Image: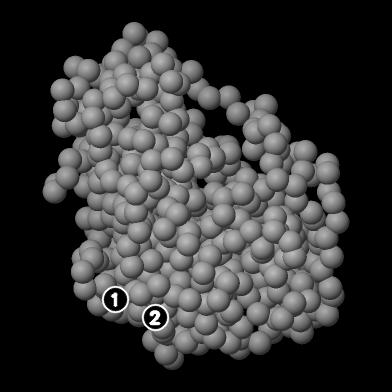
Amino acid sequence: MSVYISCHVPPLIPFEHPSTFSSRLPLFNMSPRYTAFATAALVSQTSARLTFAPCPQLNELITTVNQVPSLPTFDCGTLAVPLDYTDNSSTTLDLAVFRVNATQQPSIGSVLMNFGGPGGTGAENLPAYANQAHHIIGPQWDLVSWDPRGTGNTLPFQCNLTDFTPASISNTKRDTESLVSTNLTAVFLNFGWDFAGIMAEACYEQSNQTGNLIGTAFTARDMMEIVDALGEDGLLRYYGWSYGTVLGSFVAAMFPDRMERVVLDGNLNPHDYQSGTYGEIALHDDAAFEAFLDTCYHAGNACALNEILVPNSTADYFNKINALLAQQAPAASHNATSYSTWAGLKSQLIQALYFPVTWPSRAQTFADLLAATLSGKIPPIPDSSSNVTYGNASPNTNIIGIRASDAIFHANSSAEYLPIVEQQAAVSPGFSDAAYYSLWPSARWLMPAAERYWGDFNVTTKTPILYVNGQYDPVTPLTNAFNASQSFHGSSVLQHSGYGHGLFASPSECAARYVRAYFLNGTLPANATECLPDQTLLQTWLANVAPSNASSNGTVGGGNSTSPDATPSPAVSNGGSLVRGVNSEILVAAAFATLAFVM
């Protein structure tokens, strides 16, 4: 018999920056009576020294995986850490650790980096973003990352859902423009709760031997083992992006006296992550999608969608796309197969918002799919079977396995979880129906992490934390940074008016100067300092299309520079795809194939 542990935690009025957003979802109050394990390692720390050596074969593989001509060279090392920090007789686990050397010598130390997910690997992401990272953090730092638990070849989380189909689930039961949506509570009650249970059971059957050893608290301890093994000063210097901000919150709360520099960029609210509900992740999806379409409109024939939709205004996009979606919304609310297709499409729209530099190519993809649909052809299903991959973790489910093992809120019934779904449904008029469904298994998870952090993040760190966040981030809204900052005493929020997910997606020389100064001497900007991105959205769009297509209808957005270094197109996911569910990349083609377009 499956046993679900219920943890009732009362709502708490959320912290808010007085001049920013309202917060519709309650934070979960982690009362002081809940305590984490002692911050000193539960198993004695290793005394090993971490050494790095060239690894040309892995460098070649990662370049192939990232599908780029070349990447910065990285060195490799291995560090043995306790497999289970709660077990004094634990065996060890080998962590794969990677380093890109400082580009300005001599190096003055190491900065650890985590690129998000959870599920992203250091091997894939560190070389992909090293050049940008050195510009933002400073060229005199060595950049160090690793494959966290549950990723790559480090206890890779395995949950193959090939046989998991929507048919296996019984169907028993706007300030800005926004897309038509399904009824999220109906989705949840009709089949969503069953979906969560089936996934939890399936993953338990495949990963119950190690699924409780991949949680964020253990990963935080692994970080400090790396810090010790580097043989520097025993203090952490860290840059966390997306889920990496949660990891940063955990390690700062567990080891506050060892935090020398911590920058958290593109922030999840640690309280919401801790509960497993993710709070307001979809808060700005509608505004970001409207900006995508508005930029497309002003890009003229540089946007492939304009040829097929022929809009007279940005509102025309919504009218025509919503006419398409409205036919499918009722079925998606009540039929698991229809919802699976619907969620795959909406998830792709959300993921398209992560990097403005990719907006022109995303528009081309959507236009091609629409053109095929209008001509009566079935859009081709993407074939990724021949892609070279790295590691053995299940790419679409390790994110679920890690975050679900961390969640402290479990529910015994759909009725107990329903109020959360009702709050989730109210966050985004157009995208809540795709942003939250893959979080529901967390409430029914059968492999809670051997150590979960239960504290309240009410902490004073050795050096105050610097939070960085975009005002229009599609998956980690600015209010998350202010909420988190209120818990960590003395911290400061640096905001930039960029779109996309994090500073890597929306470069700002203004913000980078503050980050470099912080890493060098600990200087914090005044709280709520604002920076502008280096380019307007239209400038970014036109810089990333063929010159022959680069005519436009006007300008949008604002910026303080027109000629920054080109932002590299992200070769890999940063792991921060918060809406990843089951095969959403494949479902998008099927979604267009099933929708009858109405002009």
Residue 462: image location, x then y, percent: 54, 86
125 versus 484 height, above or below:
above
Residue 459: image location, x then y, percent: 46, 85
Residue 93: image location, x then y, percent: 78, 66
196 versus 289 height, above or below:
below
Q: CA distance from mark 2 to mark 1?
A: 9 Å
Nearer to the camera, 515 or 323: 515
User: In percent of the image, x 38 and y 18: which residue is there?
Assistant: 549
* Residue lying farthest to the top in this orientation: 375
Which quadrant would residue 98 be assigned to in this image? Answer: bottom right
Nearer to the camera, 418 or 317: 317
Q: Which mark is residue 15?
A: 1
Which type of secondary structure does the marked residue at label 2 adopt?
helix
Nearer to the camera, 45 or 496: 496
Which quadrant would residue 370 be assigned to in this image? Answer: top left
Q: Badge 2: few (under 14), some or many (20 or more) residues near its Cα, within 10 Å?
A: some
Residue 81: image location, x then y, percent: 77, 71
User: In percent of the image, x 75 and y 51: which residue is there?
Assistant: 74
Three-letter code, disc 1: Phe
Mark 2 or mark 1, which has the lower sequence index? 1
466 with respect to 229 (left or right): left
Three-letter code, disc 2: Ser
316 with respect to 89 (left or right): left
Which type of secondary structure does the marked residue at label 1 adopt?
loop
Q: Which residue is mark 2?
A: 487
Q: Which mark is residue 206?
A: none
Nearer to the camera, 213 or 201: 213
User: In percent of the image, x 45 and y 30: which residue is there?
Assistant: 544
380 versus 297 height, above or below:
above
* Residue lying farthest to the left in this orientation: 175
Determine whether label 2 and label 1 are within 8 Å by CB: yes
Q: Quadrant of the C terminus?
A: top left
